[in-house]
Amino acid sequence: MSYVKSTILTNPYPSIWEMLGFKVESMKKKILVVEDNMDSRELLVDALEFADYAVIEAVNGEEGERKAREECPDLILLDISLPIKAGWDVARDLRIHDQTKQIPIIALTAHAREDDKNRALEAGCTSYIPKPVKPKDVLKEISRLLSLNA
Ligand code: MN
């Protein structure tokens, strides 16, 4: 992935937006990835950066909740099984506060059971993708939710 990324995305020429004075970085949609497993997190971050999103990372529920408040991302990918604070609790607390209650949250969980899916949705998650996640499915769901929110 990193080879592909560096050969395709390293563009030495400024885009029309940059020439017009826009900061390209600030136009990107910002995605917060809350995932404690390093391999899963890197897979998601690589896919998101490749798809031209700005990515913020958190490795536990507490950090995820804090970064959601500080950074106001456009969307959150939230692992459910997290150290310090579980994903359900993070989602529920984000829904309480005004500055984070509208942010779409996609729950990622290894629990494929129907009641776990319902529990994620009841906690305030917008949708649900069972693990192991395919980056392609995640990107598809992100663009679906961002277009609903546009
Ligand atoms: Mn986990």
Image: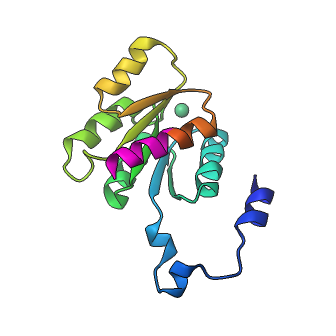
Residue 141: x %, y % from top left: 49, 38
Position of 81 compared to 48: left or right? left
Residue 98 or residue 139, whichever sits in front: 139
Q: Residue at x 40, y 31 (%)?
A: 127
Residue 11: x %, y % from top left: 70, 74
Residue lying farthest to the front in this orientation: 16
Q: Residue at x 47, y 86 (%)?
A: 21
Please tell me whether residue 104 belongs to the stretch shown in magenta: no
Q: Residue at x 46, y 53 (%)?
A: 31
Over which residues does the magenta segment extend? Answer: 141-150
Q: Residue at x 24, y 40 (%)?
A: 95
Query: Is residue 86 visible from the viewing direction of this image?
Result: no
Query: Is residue 121 visible from the viewing direction of this image?
Result: yes
Residue 69 or residue 48, whichever sits in front: 48
Position of 28 compared to 120: left or right? right
Query: Quarter of the image holding residue 133?
Result: top right
Instruction: Look at the picture and state if 116 lies above or below 7.
Output: above
Ligand 1 sits in quadrant: top right
